[in-house]
Image (tube, coloured by chain):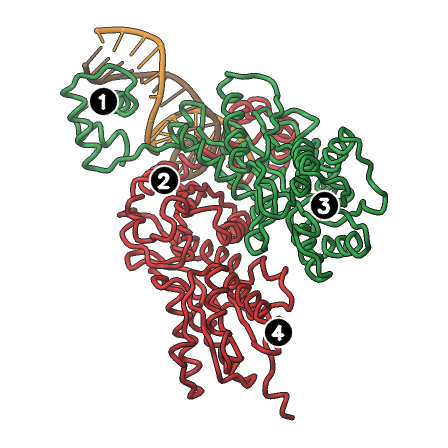
Chain colours: A green, B red, C brown, D orange
Amino acid sequence: MTLKEIASMAGVSVATVSYVLNNTAQVSDETRKKVEKIIKETGYRSNILAKSLRRNESFLVGVIVEDVTVWHTAYIIDGINEIAEARGYNTILSNLRLLNKIESQFDHISNYQKDIDKALDVMIGMQVDGIIYVGMHDRKISHILGNIKKPVVYCYCYTDGEGSSVRYSNEKTVYHMTKMLIENGHKEFGVINGLKESEPAALRYNGFLKALNEAGITMKEENITCGNWKYREGKEAAKKLLNKSGHPTAIVAMNDDMAVGVCDAARELGLKVPDDVSVTGFDNSDIIQYVTPRITTVERPLQEMGYRAMELLLENVSGVSVGDVSITLPCTLIEGESVKKLNQENR
Amino acid sequence: MTLKEIASMAGVSVATVSYVLNNTAQVSDETRKKVEKIIKETGYRSNILAKSLRRNESFLVGVIVEDVTVWHTAYIIDGINEIAEARGYNTILSNLRLLNKIESQFDHISNYQKDIDKALDVMIGMQVDGIIYVGMHDRKISHILGNIKKPVVYCYCYTDGEGSSVRYSNEKTVYHMTKMLIENGHKEFGVINGLKESEPAALRYNGFLKALNEAGITMKEENITCGNWKYREGKEAAKKLLNKSGHPTAIVAMNDDMAVGVCDAARELGLKVPDDVSVTGFDNSDIIQYVTPRITTVERPLQEMGYRAMELLLENVSGVSVGDVSITLPCTLIEGESVKKLNQENR
DNA sequence: CTGAAAGCGCTTACAG
DNA sequence: CTGAAAGCGCTTACAG
């Protein structure tokens, strides 16, 4: 079913049908009703491909994700799609499937330049109005998208080249978390850092130190440990921190997996959380709900990152806003029962 | 940059450039090289929209997912995309975001008929060659896609109308799991069923019973319990099953969340897994890795379901295969250390 | 208020 | 081996 057929059925010109469809010119009530009736009866749907070709805009946005199966990706896509739908845009998805290809060797991404170029070819060929690139890990992405002349927004990563970015705050978040612990009377800290080469790990650690510095608290070298974001290393690190007299009263784990490790380590050592040791995590991941007591953690604004990425992109597409901006969204503290209020004991 | 511009730069006709691009007619070496040089220099990419319009095929497949944030969805999308890419197809994604809208009231899906119709409008407007519908829960979907004249494949769900489907085996999987327990000498079983209204729960239970029947084992009524797929109810059910002398030697939990609940319940009652009670789960979900001993479970072939759904669809699109087929893929047993071999003790 | 016609960027018989 | 021309299904000045 095409415009032409509708036109001939209604006994009008294709132009008129188009006017009715898009409400783009004055049409007499009578004609309009006649056309609308036929459209309804036939279930006609206009060919978006033809429309886009003619109008030279596709209302299509390309979303390149480094890996769909990485947990946060689905939530970001969800956010992107919600805005897209509301604004009448569609999204085509390209999944680079990097998780199994590069593991934690994020630098090796340039090896996959070919995959990216291919994705880009398709999207530009499809005449996308812009591109959102969703990282599997928050870090700097350079040169990877080449020299495309479309608006680009990086989400869950950023670039030193052209393109806006939407991220969440690592440093401030852990700063506030740590400050909260200090306000609750904690002075002896243990910390379990993330992967050494990881930017978020470094940022989170900075936030941690900043809060300590402001409070005039210094860390004992022996209480600074490093995990690889995983449960097992978190547990091992916690055992070292806890298996001695005068152990820290609070352990800041830089993600939930490791925080759960801390809880299990504590239990195996006969220590109670939070009475003997307080624990905090990061991510508000699913694992949290299986652990008692509930670990105090922080939630990343994943869906909102998707919203903002899409909104930024559309501003660029429509020319409302020009130039690249970087947005860093705050995380939300999710208070559990894993932090003891030391200072209330003395009342 | 268009075909026409390339043609004039190369001093040939647009037809010739098209022939070179698509390798669709004999072109002299000289001409070909001349054209290829210009294409490379200019970085020309052909307009897929125009091509699709002209050829009346889009190489586009629509993927409607009930909710991207439901864990299995990402893996299925991953599988779909992998095949799509290999065959030169692109996918547009529509996310119905049903999770928060319908919770477990799967019947209420018809309330969202409008969302679905909208997604369908877009996809058909984009001239997709076919549609894959990915469920958030395995169940029958009726009438929902209306009367579209494109190939449809249902994945992680099925239909009584037109359309193929790709699912995994619930009944057989639990049948084999149970049989394995019986072969290991277990005779006293406890079972923790999933949500009452859930089809997979019913199928899994059937598989369980079938294995028992074949072995001539009957269940005590009191050992049949029902959870809601969640940790907490699993744990409560397990406490009822275990908190008595002569408790079952094996508890079959119909998913991992509840199986973890069983382990925690056992620990709290001072029972050891697997020495005092064996436990099995279903899903091979992430939670498994935090639990010691490792729970014996079963992995669903999610990515493969994506492969098969896409392959089926493309067979329909190309007309290689006609008619609807239902594929049920087997799950994979993941042996942990939560099952005791009772019969080896007596040797 | 309505329609004839050009044109978006391609592909593809067809003729030479 | 190459090119002129029609046509895919739309939109949009323009004329009336």
Q: Which residue is mark 4?
A: B272
Q: Is residue B14 left or right of residue A209?
A: left
Q: Secondary structure at mark 4?
A: loop
Query: Amino acid type of disc 2?
Result: Ala
Image quarter hosting the C terminus of chain A: top right
Query: Amino acid type of disc 1?
Result: Ser
Q: Position of residue B346 (x, y in %)?
A: 63, 92
Q: Secondary structure at mark 2?
A: helix
Q: Nearer the viewer, mark 2 or mark 1?
A: 2
Q: CA distance from mark 1 to mark 3?
A: 76 Å
The chain under label 2 reads B
The chain under label 1 reads A
Looking at the image, how many numbered discs can be counted on the residues? 4
Closer-to-camera residue (C3/A220): A220
Q: Do pointers 1 and 4 mark residues of a single chain?
A: no
Q: Residues within 10 Å of mark 1 (few under 14, many from 20)?
A: some
Q: Secondary structure at mark 1?
A: loop
Closer-to-camera residue (A325/A332): A332
Q: CA distance from mark 1 to mark 4?
A: 80 Å
Q: Residues within 10 Å of mark 3 (few under 14, many from 20)?
A: many
Q: Do pointers 2 and 1 mark residues of a single chain?
A: no
Q: Secondary structure at mark 3?
A: strand
Q: CA distance from mark 4 to mark 2?
A: 51 Å
Q: Which residue is mark 1?
A: A13
The chain under label 4 reads B
Q: Does residue B87 show up?
A: no
Q: Which residue is mark 2?
A: B119
In the image, is residue A202 above or below residue B148? above
Q: Residue at x 46, y 56 (%)?
A: B311
Using the rendered view, name the quadrant where residue B271 is placed. bottom right
Q: CA distance from mark 3 to mark 2?
A: 50 Å
